[in-house]
Image (spheres, rainbow, N blue to C red):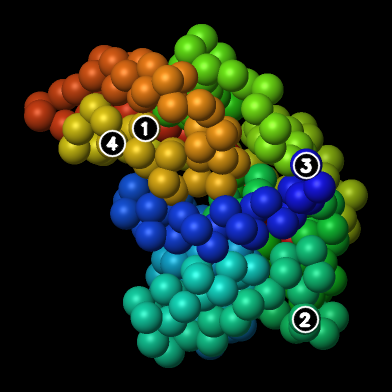
Amino acid sequence: MNQTFKEFEHEGWQAVADGYHDHFGSLTSQTIEPMLDTLGAHPGSSLLDIATGPGYVAEAARQRGFIVTAVDFSGEMVERAKRLYAGIEFQEGDAENLAFADKSFDYLTMNFGLLHLEHPEKALAESFRVTKPGGKFALTVWSTPDKAVAFQRVLDSVRNHGDSTVPIPVGPPFFRFSDHAEMRRSLTEAGFKSVEIKEISMTWVLQSEVDLFYAFFTGTPRTGGLLRAQDAEKLETIKTAVAACASEYKRDGAIRIPMSSVLASATA
């Protein structure tokens, strides 16, 4: 396969914008307030939201009084964000090659964007470059699969009932930055200091067992790409297995899956 991981991710996000919004929005939004809390209240300060997706973080930051610019490399995501939220400058942009001058922003945020990049070190270096001295960067990634349970159950279902070797472009390890030491090392190497890291407990509420399968199948580039590359028979078996896993978390008429993320913040 000649497609690079970056091209694969871009193509994926162009295709899954609706699925992500429908299935993951309520989950990934749970980290926004804790992430912005690490920045403190600074009305009138400039903030760049990188890999903004549908613009959830950007809008929350705007409501706190930040002057927000937001970038995403998916035009589909940018257009969705523009439709959802007025008063924010949304633009297409590459996290690994930001189109801004050095020391342009007081604050930066990136919610679950780092794990979708082909060269995350470049993105961290670029983030440091555009942050003003003394400014702050806050970002999130998923915790390890034993804590971000939905990932573990879906990936286990693929290993047990499908083909984990289907030909999709290989990217950096998905859970690389779940490791606190690796997150700290990478931020420090990019130039940041005073790194603080903590885990955020989350709950993913879904209405039916099959929603867990379709959340990944229609709403994610990498895990969804792994699913979409399965043959029809294996895919149906995986779908059944994922639904069975989801049923284990049924409480009070809804699926409630424990999830967790890593929140890191650092100063330029």
Q: Residue at x 82, y 85 (%)?
A: 101
Whether tag 2 and tag 1 are in contact, CB under 8 A, the answer is no
Mark on residue 213?
Answer: 1
Q: CA distance from mark 3 to mark 1?
A: 26 Å
Mark on residue 1?
Answer: 3
Give the percent coordinates (x, y) of residue 231: 51, 26
Question: Could you say which quadrant of the image residue 249 lies in?
Answer: top left
Q: Residue furthest left?
A: 253
Q: Is residue 178 left or right of residue 162?
A: right
Mark positioned earlier in the residue sequence (3 or 1) = 3
Q: CA distance from mark 3 to mark 2?
A: 30 Å
* Residue type (three-letter) at the residue carrying disc 4: Asp
Q: Residue at x 84, y 58 (%)?
A: 122
Q: Is residue 85 left or right of residue 176?
A: left
The image shows residue 107, relative to residue 192, as above or below, that is below
Q: Which residue is mark 4?
A: 211
